[in-house]
Image (cartoon, helix red, strand yellow):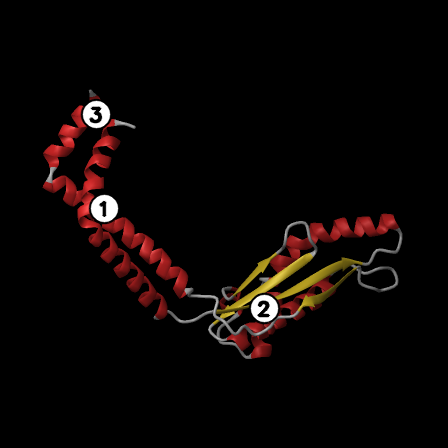
């Protein structure tokens, strides 16, 4: 332990014993303030739909393997397509949403679980039912667009098929703000502030003792 750390420890420990109530008050104030701020925020609701993509390249093992590799390689392209105006503009028109495709893009998040041919569309709005509607509409429109741009077989069939494997459900519990978590974070922050105040008070009230203890520690 360095001299400075020893000095702080010898100053802080007695100060905490005398002024523990300052830390307690700061902790409570931090928790109440953070919870109050959180409760004033507009509730947000999330709903997610999952789409699975499959390559239809034949029944042989080699064809299936090649098809799987091709599908995985295209997942980022499908994700970009889901966030683009080609998919989102029809959704805006279908649901009668305010704004345009760019506004809708800010309300959705597209993710791909690692090493899977699954694409998840999560919509976040201030209304649970609307979130589910948006996630469902985007997923369905994505499927249509993927099939429209995917190369066809000589027989005229699409080489990639997609289906919704996890339908979006209207949430009953808000995803944000998380008031209990914010309260805990506020309490932790308040405790840190309280501890800093106690340390400052300890150094101001008894600077000589800390310096003396520090010199004794050096010896």
Q: Residue at x 17, y 29 (%)?
A: 213
Q: Where is residue 18 in the image (x, y as percent from the top left)?
A: 17, 47
Vertical relation: 61 (above or below) 13: below
Q: Position of residue 61 (x, y in %)?
A: 87, 49
Q: Which of marks 3 and 1 is nearer the N terminus?
A: 1
User: Does residue 62 appear left or right of residue 126 in this picture?
Assistant: right
Q: What element carries label 3?
A: helix
Number of the front mark, 1 or 2: 1
User: Does residue 89 appear left or right of residue 15 in this picture?
Assistant: right
- Residue under pointer 2: 88
CA neighbours of label 2 inside 10 A, class few (<14), some (14 to 19), many (20+): many
Number of the front mark, 3 or 1: 3
Relative to the observer, which residue lies in front, 162 or 192? 192
Vertical relation: 33 (above or below) 137: above
User: Does residue 67 appear left or right of residue 120 in this picture?
Assistant: right
Q: Is mark 2 on a helix, strand or loop?
A: helix
- Residue under pointer 3: 217
- Residue under pointer 1: 196
Residue 24, quarter of the rendered image: bottom left
């Amino acid at each position: 332990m360095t001299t400075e750390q020893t000095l702080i420890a010898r100053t802080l420990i007695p100060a905490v014993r005398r002024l523990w109530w300052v830390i307690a008050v700061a902790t409570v104030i931090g928790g109440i303030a953070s919870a109050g701020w959180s409760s004033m925020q507009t509730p947000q609701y999330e709903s997610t739909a999952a789409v699975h993509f499959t390559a239809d390249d034949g029944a042989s093992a080699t064809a299936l393997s090649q098809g799987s590799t091709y599908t995985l390689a295209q997942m980022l392209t499908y994700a970009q397509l889901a966030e683009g105006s080609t998919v989102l503009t029809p959704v805006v028109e279908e649901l009668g949403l305010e704004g345009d495709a760019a506004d809708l893009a800010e309300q959705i998040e597209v993710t791909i679980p690692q090493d899977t041919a699954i694409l998840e569309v999560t919509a976040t709005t201030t209304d649970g039912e609307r979130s589910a509607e948006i996630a469902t509409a985007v997923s369905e429109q994505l499927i249509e667009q993927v099939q429209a741009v995917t190369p066809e077989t000589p027989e005229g069939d699409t080489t990639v098929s997609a289906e919704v494997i996890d339908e979006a459900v209207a949430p009953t519990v808000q995803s944000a703000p998380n008031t209990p978590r914010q309260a805990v974070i506020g309490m932790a922050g308040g405790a840190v502030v309280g501890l800093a105040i106690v340390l400052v008070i300890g150094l101001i009230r008894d600077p000589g003792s800390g310096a003396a203890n520090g010199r004794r520690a050096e010896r």
